[in-house]
Each structure stands twice: as structure tokens, then as C-alpha cells.
Image (cartoon, rainbow, N blue to C red):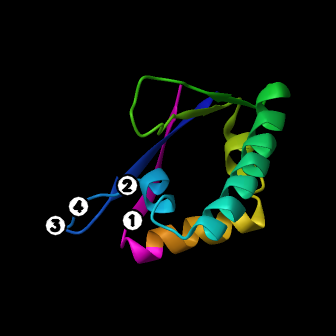
Amino acid sequence: MAIKQEFKYTVPDGQEYISFEDWIETLPQGEQDEFNAARDRQFGIRSEFVNSGTLQVLKTDEIEKNYPYIWKDADAAKKNKPNDPVWLTYWDRYLKETNTTFEIIETEI
């Protein structure tokens, strides 16, 4: 069976949520440039999985571009895909600096 992954972001009560994209815009231009190059590589990795039929990205009209993933099966979802190391550094920093909890919710479809 295919696996749908939805992504949930939570911040502590009383704290305003800031999206990853908005947080990136608060960084100095040099860091934004470094991140943008890493994001392009990260999307390239994702595209390889989409093109191979392993992953489908459900594009919706969500403002945050928080698109669910559909993996072809449980093994593919468990294995996941690699991440660009620079992109991952910014991702981890975003979660820490914004005190955001990130959760992946999986359902069989």
C-alpha cells in the first residue's frame, strides 16, 4: 500500500508560527544565497524520486507549500530520501531557533 505523509508544525502556546520560507528571509543575504543553492539541490533530490515513480508530491493551494508526500509503499517511506547536508543544517537551525516541533503523520492509502 502507498503511504501518505503529512507534515505538522507546532509552536508553544503564545508563540507565533513562522514558516521556514519566512524564517529564511530573516537571514543575512549571504546565508540566504547559500540556502537557496542548497534548496535547489534538495528539490533536485526530491525530483529524482518523483521521476522514478517512488514519490508523488501532492501540490495544493496551501500558502505554506506544505505539500503532502505519497510514497509508493511502506519500504520507500521508511527509507525516505537523502537530504542535502547544507539544506539540512538550515532546517535543523530553523526548528531550533523558532522552537518549532516538526511531526510527520503517516497513513496508508
Q: Residue at x 45, y 76 (%)?
A: 96
Indicate which disc, 2 or 4, sits on the residue closer to the N terminus: 2
Q: Position of residue 26 (x, y in %)?
A: 45, 65
Name the residue rendered at 37%, 54% in the picture: 9
Q: Pick whichever, 5 or 73, lies toward us.
A: 5
Query: Is 105 colored magenta in this rendering?
Result: yes
User: Could you say whether the residue bearing mark 4 is in a helix, strand or loop?
Assistant: loop
Q: In this figure, which residue is indicated by the disc labeled 1?
A: 101
Determine which residue is flagged by label 4: 16
Amino acid type for the residue under numbered disc 2 = Tyr
Of callouts 1 and 2, the N-terminal one: 2
Q: Residues within 10 Å of mark 1 (few under 14, many from 20)?
A: few
Q: Residue 65: horizontal and vertical position, in percent?
A: 48, 36
At 44% across and 61% down in the image, what residue appears? 23
**What amino acid is labelled 3 in the image?**
Asp
Q: Nearer the viewer, mark 2 or mark 4?
A: 4
Q: Report how far apart the C-alphas of labels 1 and 2 lie in the structure.
A: 6 Å
Q: Which mark is residue 21?
A: none
Q: Residue furthest front?
A: 29
Bounds of the magenta segment: 96-109
Marks 1 and 4, how far apart at CA: 13 Å
Marks 1,2: beta carbons within 8 A: yes
Residue shown at the point (40%, 53%) measured from the top left: 19
Q: Secondary structure at mark 1?
A: strand
Image height check: is 45 above or below 102?
above
Identify which amino acid the numbered label 4 is placed on.
Glu
Of 109 and 26, which appears nearest the observer?
Answer: 26
For label 3, count other residues whose C-alpha is less than 10 Å away and answer few (under 14), some (14-19) or many (20+): few
For this orientation, the residue located farthest to the left is 14
Residue under pointer 2: 9
- Find out whether residue 3 is within the magenta segment: no
